[in-house]
Amino acid sequence: MNQKYSCIPPILILLLACLSGTAFYLYGSQQSLPFVPNVQSAEQPVRMKQCCECHEKVCHQFSKAPHLRTLRNATDADVINKFAGKEVTLKENGHTYSFYEDERALWVSCSGYPGPVRIEWVFGSGLHAITPVSLFPNEKGQSELLQHIVSWYPSGKLGITLGLNELAHSKSGIQALGEVSSHASTLNCFGCHTSYLGNVQGEIQTSEMIPGVSCVRCHLNGEEHIKAVEEGAKDLKLTKWNQLTPLESINRCGECHRRFDQMEPDEIHPANDLLIRFAPIGMSQSPCFIKQGELKLPAGKSSRFDCTTCHDPHQQASRDPEFYRQICLNCHSNLQGHAAVCSKESMQSQCLKCHMPPVNVHDNLSFTDHWIRIREFDKKRFPQFQLNNQE
């Protein structure tokens, strides 16, 4: 991953302060509210099994969701099956990487590094990629992360880890294996892939860690909620997503999927391919998001557009284009007060192929571009970047 955007700012995970800022939009601005994930609090949060005692149906759905598999031990049988016994020679640096299992652990050897390295964890659910990582102490005894340069992709192939192409020139040393992150960045990276990190200064206490993004990462105040339920209180003290504003909602997703206010304003433009990976940033610039308050829907129903409009976070996202077309039609129609219909294609055609196309970001990987727009207008709206591309 690119070091600048690979993780959320350390200040969030360390809980030293709250980020806030004024949203930068193409069509105006809104006030951004802070959100602090409590992944390094002094006390362990509520475990998912406690949530499941009352919310069995949702928990059953969520057990298959990618968020719950964002961090797994490298000894996981599925992980071993995807890596052990496989070998790849990267075209980017010419090194050969061999993965193997030994004494119930996953290891990798590299032709450009003197000895094998044990892989302890993997980032990623496998929906886009699975990236091996190793932890080791620095000179101060603090945990630091080695993100390996080889990842597994849904095609079944091994290839260079997305964002680590810049390391390809490194022919020897630890960078032949991957990217080493500082202790602060290590906390951030694990913070996005866990529900709890533990409260030991200087190290990631894996015995206390809660891998994956479980209920408490999004629904805060778990202990207070359980107490309120037991006491029969009217206020159940639970964070409900539909009570957030759309901006608050995408910003909360953006704490790990990136927020627009973590970028410089001059970085937010269609020529910046990095934004393809960061859905909340693209959404924040989309007319569908910015102008949602202008719609007047029938029967007094208010319009709302955020990540959860299309994606139920409790289950894997649909791959059916028709599912998303129907969501588009909730706001786009010939009805008075609705958003305009497409001037080029029938509304029976698939909206995503033009307005949210998949973009190849890697030999083995593509992402859906969540900056929803009419792409033919890009040159007119961003002439400065067209000129820069010609220089």
Image (cartoon, helix red, strand yellow):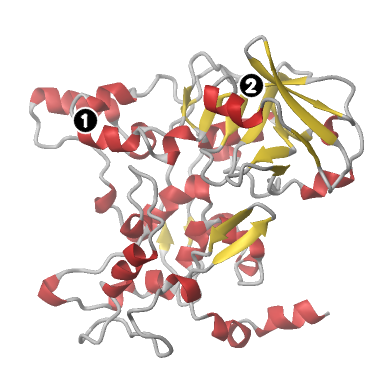
**Location of residue 253 in the rendering, given as x and y in whole percent from the top left corner:** 43, 49
- Taking the spot 78% from the left edge, 28% from the top edge, the residue there is 98
Q: In the displayed image of the protein, which residue is found farthest to the top? A: 103
**Taking 233 as reference, is 216 left or right?**
right
Mark 1: which amino acid?
Answer: Glu
Q: Work out whether residue 88 or residue 151 is closer to the camera in this orientation and state it.
A: 88
Residue 192 drawn at (x, y percent): 52, 37
**Mark 1 or 2 closer to N-term?**
1
Residue 16 visible in the picture: no
Q: Position of residue 122 (x, y in %)?
A: 60, 30
Categorize mark 1 by other alpha carbons within 10 Å: few (<14), some (14-19), many (20+).
few
The one of 20 and 236 positioned closer to us in this rendering = 236
| Mark 2, other Cα within 10 Å: few <14 / some 14–19 / many ≥20 | some
Image coordinates of residue 282 in percent, x first then y, are: 51, 64
- Residue 193 horizontal side relative to residue 186, left or right: left
Q: Which residue is mark 2?
A: 120
Q: Amino acid at mark 2?
A: Glu
Disc 2 secondary structure class: loop
Quarter the C terminus occupies: bottom right
Q: Is residue 291 above or below residue 250?
A: below
Tell me the residue that label 1 is attached to. Answer: 56
Q: Secondary structure at mark 1?
A: helix
Q: Residue at x 72, y 44 (%)?
A: 159
- In space, the residues marked 1 and 2 are separated at their CA atoms by 31 Å
Question: Is 268 situated left or right of 235 in this image?
Answer: right
Q: Residue placed farthest to the bottom in the image?
A: 343
Which quadrant holds residue 51? top left
Quarter of the picture containing the N terminus is top right
**Residue 83 visible in the picture:** yes
